[in-house]
Image: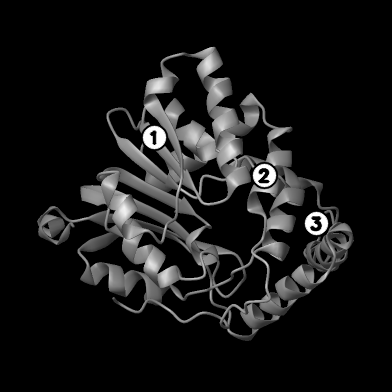
Amino acid sequence: MVCLSEPVTPVEESETRFAFGKNWASFLDQFDAERLQHATSSLKSLLQVESLAGKRLLDIGSGSGLFSLAAVSMGAEVVSVDLDDDSVACTRELRERAVAENPSVAEQWQVHRGSALDAEWLTSLGTFDVVYSWGVLHHTGQMNTAIEATSSVVAPGGQYAIAIYNDQGGGSRRWLRIKQGYHRLPAFLRPAYVVLVAGCYELKFALARLAQGRNPLPFADWRAKKSDRGMNAWHDWVDWIGGLPFEVAKPEAIILPLREKGFVLDNLTTVGSGWGCNEYVFRRLEESAKSLP
């Protein structure tokens, strides 16, 4: 197996895996057509396409199911996969809503509970024209293995779209300690912890906006968050502060090993030296078909 990166630190057995599904279950209460429109626009921009008609898409770590639904609305045949029971339930609920409006979606959209680390099971699903996994593989605890497994089911000529936490060095280690602090608290104190941590950073952002002569209030940035990926600021803060396991990678640690596997980079958006996810879209070369399982 090609080594893509090193974890920020080994995940301790005492650490609790973050309940991503419970976070996104509350997000579903805020789901509306506008959020779907923003998610669809984001997917089109990332993949640099207007339609996914005739394409087969695998959504690894479907979470709320929002981007699976966006892919369905673009014409794709979608297979949604998540390990978290609550996330699977969220995705299924969103699918049921879509089927109620359009019964043909039932044949177009499948939802499964499964792991990005289970290469044999992923292979049993077949190959895909698009494998999409935004902000997920670095939470598996074995990011290298997850990238190996999920990239292997991309069909020749297909796209592999992933978002991976940027490696900030010391900054990433500080974030790891913040995340570990979240999990050491009893559940009823965690929302207050999120408010405290997020409040400190929002104040920092406000001062930066003020120094630039801009309105220091965060509302414009929060609205931009919704238009960016159809998400909202609160759920993103909870996801970010609580998200364990936690691994990071510099762009070259992702790009170079995948190039060795027959992938070329189609699209790249980085956060520079900051924190957050770098977005990658690779295309599998036709001649790499011989490396498929």
Q: Secondary structure at mark 2?
A: helix
Check contact, mark 2 vs mark 1: CB within 8 A: no
Q: Earlier in the sequence, mark 2 or mark 3?
A: 2
Which residue is drawn at the image coordinates 55% and 64% (left, top)? 139
Amino acid tagged 3: Arg
Q: Earlier in the sequence, mark 1 or mark 3?
A: 1
Q: Residues within 10 Å of mark 2 (few under 14, many from 20)?
A: many
> How far, Cα to Cα, is label 2 from label 1?
20 Å
The foreground one among 269 and 62 is 62
Residue 209 visible within the image: yes
Q: Using residue 284 as the reference point, say whether residue 220 is left or right of it.
A: right
Which residue is drawn at the image coordinates 77% and 64% (left, top)? 212
Q: Using residue 2 as the reference point, say whether residue 187 is left or right of it.
A: right
Q: In this picture, is 52 found above or below 184? A: above
Q: Which residue is mark 3?
A: 214
Q: Which residue is mark 2?
A: 24
Q: Residues within 10 Å of mark 1 (few under 14, many from 20)?
A: many
Q: Which residue is mark 1?
A: 78
Q: Residues within 10 Å of mark 3 (few under 14, many from 20)?
A: few
Which residue is drawn at the image coordinates 68% and 57% (left, top)? 239
Quadrant for the C terminus, please. Answer: bottom left
